[in-house]
Image (cartoon, rainbow, N blue to C red):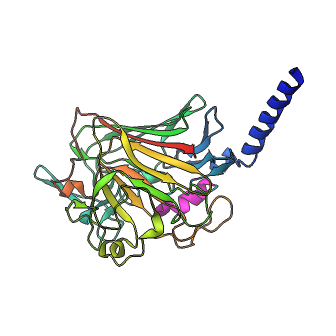
């Protein structure tokens, strides 16, 4: 009897070893550099279930994220690069990055607070995108690793940076929980009224980086409405029902099932690149979306206290870049699910307010929870 117990234990350990044997961590020295006197590093977080993520304080970018499938085999489900230099040379990819001061687009890079007009830096035609050309994704954050599974990042965005008013103190906590969650908490305070909308721009493929199209993934978005856009991908101001449209993901639907339909909104976005109005309460986190790869069985549930989520289907991926494993990152081979306030809210009073005033505390929560079935 003792022999059989030992044998079973040995088999379990061998199985665990095999399931994690393909995990390929990046050498942290590949991110050891200095930018304007600030030290760049790569940090490794792990939980007791074998999940691992590596995050750099260069833009707060999630570099990789290793998640098990239904058979216990691990794959890196996020898109990224192997070195700090690749991120520095290609910041416009936004792979895995913290986004701010304002995630998504602001029309004409301009808004008014009280009677003052603020002109932001523009980097998307005439619009400002993701905080401007040197947004939070391009900054070196102060970093402190707290134990094996938590990383704290801090950054002060000074008054006038990219045109935004006020000194904004930002703290972001990344935590890899024992419930297989990648939990992201955002905190901010300001000394002048300013608009803030923080998010994360990780590109996901639950089959693994560069493992083929994400159009075979199943997606559920907990939203009865979305915000249609104009030709510049700026919301028109309408919150339109998803009923009877390709934007109805209230039941899990294959992403590719309707993406090529003759629909004006799909044409404007080149596919899915829109904000959904979540059926959620701002008082607590709610389920925003569920993504599933039917082959591996990996499932990602997204929880947030935000009113919206941007689903971007990888429409601008053009094969220009290669990922961490030498494979070309092709058209629609990854997607983003960015929890957020709505695009262009500073210019749309009917949208949830993004103005942060002195004395107020900004808090945003995003949880990417992984399981297999």
The reply to whether residue 314 is in sight is no
Whether 338 is among the magenta residues is no
Left or right side of 4 for 351: left
- Position above or below: 159 against 82: above
Task: Locate residue 149: give its quadrant.
Answer: top right
Task: Locate residue 211: give its quadrant.
Answer: bottom right
Query: What is the x, y in percent for residue 55?
Result: 56, 44
Q: What is the count of numbered marks? A: 0
Q: Residue at x 32, y 55 (%)?
A: 162
Left or right side of 10 for 172: left
Closest to the observer, 276 or 45: 276
What's the magenta region? 83-94
* Quadrant occupied by the N terminus: top right
Q: Residue furthest top?
A: 2
Q: Residue furthest right?
A: 3
Left or right side of 61 for 273: left
Whether 86 is among the magenta residues is yes
The reply to whether residue 372 is in sight is yes
Q: Residue at x 54, y 34 (%)?
A: 179
Closest to the observer, 107 or 279: 279
Query: What is the x, y in percent for residue 117?
Result: 16, 56
Q: Residue furthest bottom?
A: 262
Query: What is the x, y in percent for residue 90?
Result: 53, 63
Left or right side of 21 for 333: left
Query: What is the x, y in percent for residue 323?
Result: 62, 61
Q: Residue furthest left?
A: 115
By secondary structure, the bulk of the magenta-drawn segment is best described as helix
Task: Locate residue 208: give its quadrant.
Answer: bottom right
Q: Residue at x 30, y 71 (%)?
A: 232
Closest to the observer, 216 or 282: 216
């Amino acid at each position: 009897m003792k022999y059989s117990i030992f044998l079973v234990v040995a088999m379990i350990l061998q199985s665990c070893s095999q399931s994690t044997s393909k995990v390929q961590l990046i050498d942290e020295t590949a991110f050891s550099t200095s930018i304007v006197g600030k030290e760049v590093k790569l940090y490794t977080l792990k939980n007791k279930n074998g999940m691992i993520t590596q995050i750099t304080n260069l833009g707060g970018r999630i570099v990789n994220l290793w998640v098990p499938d239904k058979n216990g085999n691990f794959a890196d489900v996020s898109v990224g690069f192997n070195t700090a230099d690749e991120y520095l040379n290609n910041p416009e990819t936004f792979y895995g990055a913290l986004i701010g001061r304002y995630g998504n687009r602001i029309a004409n890079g301009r808004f008014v607070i009280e009677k003052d007009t603020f002109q932001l830096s523009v980097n998307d035609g005439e619009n400002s995108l993701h905080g401007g050309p040197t947004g939070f994704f391009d900054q070196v954050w102060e970093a402190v690793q707290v134990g094996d599974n938590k990383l704290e990042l801090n950054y002060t965005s000074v008054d006038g940076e990219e045109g935004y008013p006020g000194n904004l103190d930002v703290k972001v906590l990344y935590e890899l929980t024992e419930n297989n969650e990648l939990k992201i908490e955002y905190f901010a305070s300001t000394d002048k009224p300013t608009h803030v909308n923080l998010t994360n721009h990780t590109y996901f493929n639950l089959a693994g980086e560069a493992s083929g199209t994400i159009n075979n993934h199943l997606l559920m978005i907990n939203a009865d409405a979305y915000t249609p856009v104009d030709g510049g991908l700026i919301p028109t101001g309408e919150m339109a029902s998803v009923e009877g449209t390709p934007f109805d993901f209230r039941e899990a639907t294959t992403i590719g099932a309707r993406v090529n339909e003759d629909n004006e909104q799909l044409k404007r976005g080149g596919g899915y690149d829109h904000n959904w109005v979540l059926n959620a309460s701002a008082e607590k986190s709610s389920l925003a979306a569920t993504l599933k790869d039917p082959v591996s069985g990996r499932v990602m549930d997204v929880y947030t206290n935000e009113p919206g989520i941007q689903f971007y289907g990888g429409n601008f991926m053009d094969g220009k870049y290669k990922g961490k494993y030498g494979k070309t990152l092709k058209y629609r081979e990854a997607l983003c699910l960015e929890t957020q306030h709505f695009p262009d809210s500073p210019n749309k009073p009917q949208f949830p307010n993004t103005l942060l005033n002195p004395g107020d505390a900004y808090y945003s929560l995003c949880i990417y929870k992984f399981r297999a079935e």
